[in-house]
Structures are given as C-alpha cells and as structure tokens.
Image (cartoon, grey):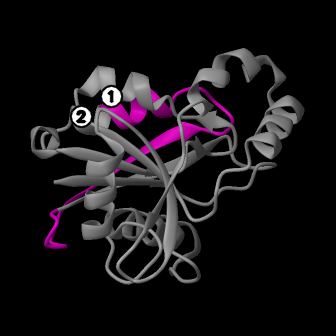
Amino acid sequence: MVLGVDDGPFNRRLDTKSLIIGTMMRLDFRIEAILTREIVVDGEDVTPVIASMVDSKHGQEIDLIVTNGVTFAGMNILDIDSLNEKTGVPVISVSRRIPDLVAMRLAIEKHSPQKLDQVASRLSHETFAVELNSNNKIYANCTGISAVDATLVLRRSCLNGKVPEAVRISHMIGSAIKFGESGGKA
C-alpha cells in the first residue's frame, strides 16, 4: 500500500497553516483511505506530521511513502531519512522537474536563512531520473529502498500522468478543499 502525500495550496501572506493530504492506495489503484493533517507554513513540522499518518489506524498497511518533493507549505522541508527512521517505511520523493538545488538554496537563504545548515543533509540525496510507462520522466530520491526498486514501484504506480496516482489524488483533494474544485496539473 502506497501513501501518496502532497500539501494543499496556501497563501504565504495570509495563511499560517496548510493542509497536507495523504492518499492510501493499492498498486491496483484502489483507494483505501484519505488522511489529512495541518502543517505550519514555513515551519519545521512536516516530518512528524507525515509520520503521524503512518501512526493512524490505517498506518500498519502502509508499505511505502511517496511525496511530492521535499518542500511543503513553503519552506517546511521534509527529512526523508528521519521519516524512514521514525516509521520504518521506505520513502520516495518525486518531482516533475529535476530539482534545482541552487535555486532551492537561494530560496532558503531568502525566506529561512536559519534553516540552511539543518536542510543541507535533507537535500543531499542523489536524484535519479525515472522513465515512466507513459513516456513521461520524473525525478526521484529515496531512502529505505533501492533506486532500482523505487523505479519499479514508480512505474507501476503511475497511470498516465507524471506523478504516482496516490500523489496526484492528494494534490487534487487539496485543491478541491481550498478552491471548491480541482483541476490543472496534478
């Protein structure tokens, strides 16, 4: 069972919290549960909050956590190693584009300079490209699972899109809750 995690849209000037959504989905694309939590915009709580999803009544069924990147609610940066250690569940972070670590570092310096040392190790995982069955390419990094196994799971968990289906559903739910409807690039 895959837990696909994404954050909901937020307004940096108005919102102090952002919704985070987890969709528990089987590899046959059957949704088993939807989990929601809140995290602090530009905070430091995303790692324990995602871990709390694994601690939910459905958590014992989770075999893999897949996240949409490592930044949530602005500069709330996920520590995939810590999440893997806390939960015992492998973690894969995916993105549609190859992460621009220079741009990310500049954004951290601008918005949260006190986090530079703290996030250096979080951004140090090797990123690898995954060619999907849909001929799309995504980029991933992982912990608790090999890149080879992560590639196999990612190929199997994507229908036609550019992200695993559980992550796509979480993205759509977040948009629907915030705006009353989903749409766009999920």
Q: Would residue 52 be found to the left or right of residue 93 on screen?
A: left
Q: Is residue 9 magenta?
A: no
Residue at numbered disc 1: 84
Q: Is residue 169 above or below residue 127?
A: below
Residue 41 sits inside the magenta stretch: yes
Q: Nearer the viewer, residue 96 or 12?
A: 96
Q: Which mark is residue 89?
A: 2
* Residue at 37%, 70% in the rendered image: 169
1 and 2 marks in contact (CB < 8 Å): yes
Residue 84: which quarter of the image?
top left
Q: Position of residue 119 (x, y in %)?
A: 65, 24
Q: Secondary structure at mark 1?
A: helix
Name the residue located 39 percent from the left edge and 46 percent from the top edge.
Answer: 92
Q: Residue 99 location, x and y as percent?
A: 66, 51
Q: Give the crowd class for mark 2: few <14, some 14-19, many >=20 residues within 10 Å.
A: some
Give the residues drawn in magenta, as a range: 26-51
**Picture coordinates of residue 18 (x, y %)?**
57, 48
Q: CA distance from mark 1 to mark 2?
A: 5 Å
Kindly identify which numbered label has been placed on residue 141: none
Q: Quadrant of residue 179?
A: bottom right
> Circle 1: is it few (<14), some (14-19), or many (20+) Cα within 10 Å?
many
Residue type at tag 2: Val
Tell me which residue sits at (33%, 70%) in the image: 165
- Count numbered badges in the picture: 2
Residue 66 horizontal/vertical position (percent)? 36, 50
Q: Is residue 106 left or right of residue 7?
A: right
Up the image or down, 169 lies above or below 150; here it is below
Tell me if residue 176 comes above or below residue 125 in the rendering: below
Q: Looking at the rendering, in which quadrant would you find the N terminus?
A: bottom left
Q: Secondary structure at mark 2?
A: loop
Q: Is residue 132 above or below residue 184?
A: above
Dot 1 amino acid type: Asn
